[in-house]
Image (cartoon, helix red, strand yellow):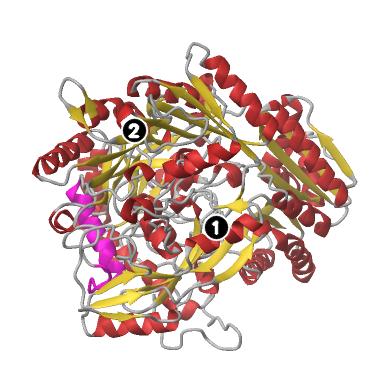
Amino acid sequence: MSLVMPKPDEATLLKSSSIINGLKKISKHVLSEEEERAVYETDGLSIHRQKPIAVVLPETTKEVSLILKYCYDNNVKVVPRGAGTGLSGSALPLEDSVLVVLGKFNKILEIDFENRCVVTQPGVTNLSITGAVQHEGFYYAPDPSSQMACSIGGNISTNAGGVHSLKYGVTTNNVLGVEMVLIDGTIIRLGGKNLDAEGYDLLGVVTGSEGLLGVITEITVKILKKPQSVRAVLIGFDTNDDAGNCVADIISAGIIPAGMEIMDKPLIIATDNFAKAGYPRDVEILLIVELDGTESEVNTLIEKVLEIAKKNKASYNRASESDEERLRFWKGRKAAFTALGAISPDYICMDGSIPRKKLGTVLNEITRLSKKYELAVANCFHAGDGNLHPLIMFDSNNKKELKKAEFFGADILKYCVKVGGVLTGEHGVGIEKRELMCEMFNNDDIQQQLSLKKAFDEKSLLNPGKVFPILHRCAEEGRVHVHKGKTRFPDLPSF
Amino acid sequence: MTDIYRPNNQEEISQFIYDCYESNRPIEIITFNSKPIGRSIQCSQTLDLSKNSGIVEYQPDELYIKVKAGTPLIDILEVLKSKNQMLGFEPVDLGYLYNGKPNYGSIGGVVSCNLSGPRRFKSGSLRDHLLGFTAVNGKGECIKSGGTVVKNVTGYDLSKLLAGSYGTLSVLTEVTLKVVPKPEFSETFVMYGLTPKEALEVFSKVMKTSLEISGACHYPKNNIDFLRLNDLDNSRTITALRIEGPKNSVQERIESLNKIFKEVKEKTILEIYQSDLFWKISANLECFNNSPKIVAKISLPPTETTDFISQFCEDEIMGINNKYFVEWAGGLIFLEIGNEDPSYLILEKMKKFCKEKSAHIMIMKADNTFRTSGFFLSSSDENIKTLASKVKLSFDPKSILNPGKIYAGI
């Protein structure tokens, strides 16, 4: 499909071979052949593809610094990339860009149990951090579904969450420090092993900035001790509203579950077929609630949760009796994306965040839209933190279906904003939701963000075309976006 | 004399800042002006935000509260209490430090300082609890970021930047804060007579268990007189560990602590009422009640804390005896030092120590001379200062909002 990206700079394209030579003087690992570059032409949002001028895989911070300085001096755009599992296209190369891949930064540098932290390179996978500390009973809390493959550097880029965010926070709440390289090659350190860093919280703003502010070369994360006891309970309901009310009542009772997940019927069936999780197949909606703490605490909380479920007309419940059973409950949920891949040729995964109590309303709207667009949808929802992942199924061989799926997705996100939510909870804006930013922000909001971008990257060389709308007046696909019957910013210069 | 302007709402704030932007007039931003924290600044205009006050929206089951920035924090705490909820970052009342009496000030001020209480190492700092805001930047433009949900990566997370920016980037007009349920029960396990080194070892040990300690502090001999609680002996050093949660869980975990520290003879348990009081006193720095000296906050990796204490806090051989205490399971020291020349020298040495050890100093209170000529935050890196300066100008291009409050010249 057509995607509008910043116009490639002709001068840069013309001097491609000199850029490649320049990079080769700095790094041993420059890929410039057609087939080598093709490997990196897309990320987790694979409907868009673009080969860069060159792909560089630096091995040291110094090398990253020299590469960025070279690009800065020669006005060449740079796109950083971690493991390439991102779902919104933040790591999509530009035609006139150099792709800096952090894959060779794959070592854990220091495990410091005394200060409860791990110092790691950004290319290390999320799960390997837990793997490196679990022998002492520690773990790294954020656990995105892709944790086996996604890199910790990429997690910082999208402020990745997971299923335990309500109690343990997302990436930003679990990162203590980074070393990063600015576009002009300057190497800086933000934060460290201490809890409060100095001055402006630059680490806080770099986290979730989708590679627009700098290239991260080292990360210090907080590690936590595993809870004494963890149990999960499966609760089935006949209606969306009963499930939504149950979630609200659990929170109102002062219970903060470690995880609280919802799946709708299409996903229950798909995941159960795929992962043999033992889910009830005759319920419309399934809630998984995980509780952790001391053994007696967990047992008391499970009873309370089951009582609340009963009040909300739960038609099924089962508490895990062993850790194997608990992990089986999660196996289905964690395999949601793969399971859906087995029943639909293609799907797109949306990522809105909404107030918890709007869950019923939003699910009902998604059902209505599904009929309107004649496309099937399955829903999973991080109910604890209000993060909704509708999975829209389509067949990409049918061009019309792809188009419809994208409109369907955009309508869902607009509805999320309408009920008080946001466009993206944990996947990032990337190129996918770029033009929807005006649903949430007005011109002043966006101009402020762009000014901040300039403080880090005055020439706008780092990952341009991502996050911020590039079409005039928040136009979508060439048509002026009309909101409430009027254009929002009649006098707006293009941003 | 400066002109004090007291706008009623965001529109008036925006207009005022726009006018000041146009006419290049720097503005000092205050609410109740109760705590002159930060570097001393001189501005022709004063913007008093106390009238922009009130709770906009409180959704207990969505775990957030949205308030106007001039709202007194005490009002917010009362409302949350009525629903058995609280602010998870455990706000610090600097009223004791500055004037010897309680005065939480306004929520806008609290957010601008990003100070977090004893629970910080477990629950995160204030910035982790700020979900979104609206504000007016240095050009008079109304801006917003974030929302009311905990998971949000829609654009840059400007909430993080504004928390702890001391009013130098934008003027907050409305903030949305995450709220959490109040723990059902809590108790504090106290051990007496430990040296700082032994206390740090205790912290290290308990942080490697699953006991979910939510407060861990140490008060040395020279700083215990003020701790007057029925069940607390304030004649020896105090090392305290807080446990919170459902009653049965708290009691089980206290029992576990008893087992782990069975060798320690001198210990006691503070039940819920005294426990709550103890941590409130500690959070509010009541040991430095109305201090006439310089009070500094040092955030450092726990493994460096013992070394810092022997160099700058207490050492019999070297004759060092400054009033201090340790918080955040060893990750934080509050230290009081004299406000005359030798102390400035000590501060310079502390800065050097911090630069080498991934640590950082903030001056919580100082006299006007030091606030004018000394530093507020120890800065380790010129590149970061340069970047901070650019960030400041991206919000406030003419540098009219609290100029120089954090760093001289920024």
Q: Determine the residue positioned at 52% across, 49% down.
A: A86
Can you tell which of label 2 and label 1 is closer to the viewer? 1
**Residue type for callout 2:** Pro
Region of the chain picked out in magenta, as a range: B381-402
Is A46 located above or below residue A445 in the figure?
A: above
Is residue B372 inside the magenta stretch?
no
Q: Quadrant of residue B269?
A: top right
Viewed as shown, does residue B18 lie left or right of A134? left
Q: Disc 2 sits on a residue from what chain?
A: B
* Quarter of the figure with the C terminus of chain A: bottom left
Q: Quadrant of residue B98?
A: bottom left
Mark 1 lies on residue: B77
Q: Residues within 10 Å of mark 1 (few under 14, many from 20)?
A: some
Q: Position of residue A356 (x, y in %)?
A: 68, 58
Q: Are marks 2 and 1 in contact (CB under 8 Å)?
A: no
Main secondary structure type of the part rendered in magenta: helix
* Front one among B317 and A262: B317
Mark 2 lies on residue: B301
Q: Secondary structure at mark 1?
A: helix
Q: Position of residue A128 (x, y in %)?
A: 50, 29
> Do we see residue A7 in this rendering?
no
Q: Position of residue B310 (x, y in %)?
A: 23, 25
Q: Do dots 2 and 1 share one subunit?
A: yes
> Do we see residue B242 in this rendering?
yes
**Residue type for callout 1:** Leu
Is residue B385 inside the magenta stretch?
yes
